[in-house]
Image: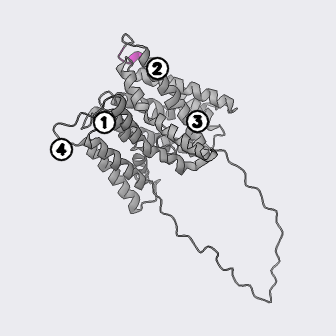
């Protein structure tokens, strides 16, 4: 039973993350605006992580410098992508939104190649990059005059969702440079970041259009599930999954998100399952899979022969006590880098 726990956790994580666009669309349908969803989602997610951080005895970061970095990270990784995702699903189906959101690793690789930080330019990864963006082009289908009723085509909704995915990639690069080695636990650091995101989005509320006149209980339930489960709890589950299965195992969840979001959209929102959406659901994750491959060095012989020692020479051996390797607590990089959290950012 114990061996099944990571598999169950992975399935729950894929379900929660993949359903994020479904709950966002329901909240929009029942009276909430994209910015209101962003505020409530960030605040509820922060509340969950604050409780988890306190139970894990992790303190919030201190110092003006780290909080300045957290504010920037909150804008890039939470406020902006959350708002763009909610804006995008107003005109794009939740299934197609999940497919577009899965392009984050492709943007990460593209940014790495552009900035020179990505040096593994093997043909397999470059081919995956081209294949992934070919899937995005397939979703756009600019050659079609009358796109299918899935919200695809060259529209602002698709561009907003691609912007959200690219925002995650930029955020991961930034956080990997400035928020590693701070000495703050990952739960506390993420709780602080989501708290900053809630504050940033709240400041923008007076300038936003929309009222709560048509708001009902369904909208509140939808955004509560989105904030508590699809944002706060998923981070904790992903953290546990990385600790047990490693970053590679946790990244497998990212390939399930388009499937989950598409299935839920078709089942509960009566979204059209067009050929283009299905093709994108296959091509984009395939490109992501190839783009994530690393060329490994050829392994040497299992038992290499020792160097010959002249028979007339006696080599004294010093008796040394092996130094225990310190156990490292998973840091923010191991959780929030594109390799480990391609979809921990959530939709």
Q: In the figure, 28 relative to 317: above or below? A: above
Q: Which residue is mark 3?
A: 236
Dots 1 and 4: beta carbons under 8 Å? no
| Mark 2 vs 1, N-terminal side | 1
* Badge 3: residue crowd in 10 Å (few <14, some 14–19, many ≥20): many
At numbered mark 3, what does the secondary structure look like: helix, strand or loop?
A: helix
The span picked out in magenta is: 205-210
Label 3 – label 2 distance at C-alpha: 21 Å
Indicate which disc residue 143 carries: 4
| Relative image position of residue 273 (x, y in whole percent) | 29, 38
Q: Which of label 4 and label 2 is nearer to you?
A: 2
Q: Are marks 3 and 1 in contact (CB under 8 Å)?
A: no
Q: Is residue 83 visible?
A: no
Q: Any mark on residue 158, and which?
A: 1
Residue 203 in the image, given as x and y percentages of width and height: 46, 20
Q: Secondary structure at mark 2?
A: helix
Tag count in the figure? 4
Q: Nearer the viewer, mark 3 or mark 2?
A: 2
Residue 193 spot, x, y in % from top left: 55, 31
On residue 221, which mark appears? Answer: 2
């Amino acid at each position: 039973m114990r061996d099944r726990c990571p598999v169950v956790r992975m399935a729950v994580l894929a379900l929660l993350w993949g359903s994020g666009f479904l709950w966002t669309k329901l909240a929009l349908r029942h009276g909430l605006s994209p910015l209101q969803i962003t505020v409530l989602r960030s605040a509820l997610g922060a509340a969950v992580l604050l409780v988890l951080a306190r139970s894990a005895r992790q303190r919030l970061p201190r110092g003006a410098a780290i909080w300045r970095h957290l504010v920037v990270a909150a804008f890039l990784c939470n406020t902006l992508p959350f708002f763009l995702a909610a804006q995008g699903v107003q005109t794009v189906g939740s299934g197609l939104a999940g497919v577009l959101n899965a392009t984050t690793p492709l943007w990460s690789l593209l940014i790495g190649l552009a900035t020179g930080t990505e040096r593994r330019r093997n043909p397999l990864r470059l081919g995956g990059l081209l294949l992934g963006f070919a899937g995005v082009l397939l979703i756009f289908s600019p050659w079609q005059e009358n796109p299918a009723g899935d919200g695809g085509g060259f529209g602002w909704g698709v561009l907003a969702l691609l912007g959200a995915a690219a925002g995650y990639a930029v955020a991961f690069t930034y956080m990997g440079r400035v928020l590693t080695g701070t000495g703050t636990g990952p739960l506390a650091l993420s709780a602080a970041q989501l708290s900053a995101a809630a504050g940033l989005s709240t400041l923008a509320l007076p300038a936003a259009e929309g009222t709560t006149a048509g708001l009902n209980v369904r909208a509140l339930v939808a955004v509560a599930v989105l904030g508590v489960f699809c944002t706060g709890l998923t981070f904790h589950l992903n953290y546990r999954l990385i600790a047990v299965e490693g970053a590679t195992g946790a990244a497998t969840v990212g390939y399930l998100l388009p499937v989950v979001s598409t299935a839920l959209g078709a089942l509960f929102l009566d979204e059209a399952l067009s050929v283009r959406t299905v093709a994108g659901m296959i091509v984009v994750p395939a490109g992501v899979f190839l783009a994530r491959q690393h060329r490994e060095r050829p392994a040497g012989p299992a038992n290499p022969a020792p160097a010959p020692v002249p028979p007339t020479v006696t080599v004294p051996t010093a008796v040394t006590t092996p130094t225990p390797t310190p156990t490292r607590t998973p840091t923010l990089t191991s959780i929030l880098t594109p390799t480990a959290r391609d979809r921990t950012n959530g939709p």
